[in-house]
Amino acid sequence: MRKTGFIAVVGQANAGKSTLVNSLVGQKVSIVSPKPQTTREQILGVWTDEDSQMVFVDTPGFLHSKNALGDYMLKSIESAVQDVDCILVVIDGHDGIDDRELAQIAKYRSRNVPIVVAVSKIDITQPPRLMPELAKLNGIEGLNEVYCVSAKRNNGVEELKQGLKKYLSGSEMYFEEDDVTDKTMRFSVSEIIREKVLLACEQEIPHGVGVEINKMQQNGSAWDIDATVIVEKASHKPIILGKHGAMIKSIGVHARESIEKLLQANVFLTLWVKVKEDWRNNPSMLNELGYSNRQK
């Protein structure tokens, strides 16, 4: 009988949570970019082997909300840590452990849930710099274990995965054996496009970008996808379009390549850019894009 359970993955923005979840699952289920709050809601990554099924709940980075979307993201974090078997706190070892991480660990101790810390990005952190940071975690009451990992290089990830198994308390299979996420293909496609926008416009565009799938239709062995990239300011639209449309074309090429890998089929992708000022404070727009607190 398999042991099963849920593991909430929490931490500061850009701590490496999504990269670690992807590595733990062995497949990309969460998009990744250098921008804070790239992840906007709970995304489940599922790992199943012969003796266990672990459901990892990837969450947005801790933040101070400035709009309705931020409120939604905060509720996503709070919802994620409810009724889980373990809370996995991811800390960027390269940036160091500060009072914010220590305060979050202290906050979760009151839940009487096992707390495991994964110190990430050890591949770019020299041991003399890392060891004093790890010492800050020594003796924290209620902290069960600490692992050092590099998700990009897959170092320490298998050890972490095996260690987390001991905290699983269920026996019910929540997903089929070949499932890796709870998200629909439509959601995954929209997230891939958003990721490519964030990566292409890293310096020029803040993370206030949304993607709406207008059409996603299978025609024989290929997919016809039409999507709109939504920005908050008129000045952002020409940046994403680029000179003579070069930027949006490049975004489309990279997005199409990743979507084809996801769907295992040829894809015809059409992208548009639309300005919706202050959309992150517009309940109607948030609902249209799938950010709704009604189920949180």
Image (cartoon, rainbow, N blue to C red):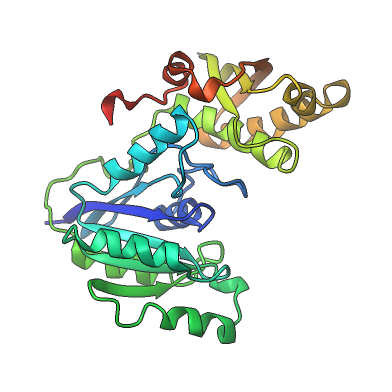
Placement of 138 over or under 262, stated as above or below? below
Residue in front for this viewpoint, 93 or 22: 93
Q: Residue furthest bottom?
A: 128
Residue 125 in percent (x, y) is at: 60, 75
**Residue 104 percent coordinates (x, y):** 35, 60
232 or 58, nearer to the observer: 232
Residue 113 left/right relative to 22: left
Q: Residue at x 24, y 76 (%)?
A: 141
Q: Is residue 30 above or below residue 231?
A: below
In the rendered view of the protein, which quadrant contains the N terminus?
Answer: bottom left
Whether residue 219 appears in this view of the structure is: no
Residue 209, quarter of picture: top right
**Does residue 131 appear to the left or right of 118 in the view shown?**
right
Q: Residue at x 65, y 19 (%)?
A: 268
Residue 79's place in the image compared with 223, above or below, is below
Residue most extreme to the right: 244
Residue 123 placement: quadrant: bottom right
Q: Estimate the x, y position of residue 160 in percent, counting from the top left.
A: 36, 68
Could you say where residue 159 lies in the image, as x and y percent from the top left? 36, 72
Q: Quadrant of residue 251?
A: top right
Position of the C terminus, as image quadrant, is: top left
Q: Nearer the viewer, residue 22 or 78?
A: 78
Is 126 located above or below residue 255 in the figure?
Answer: below
Looking at the image, residue 232 sits to the left or right of residue 289; the answer is right
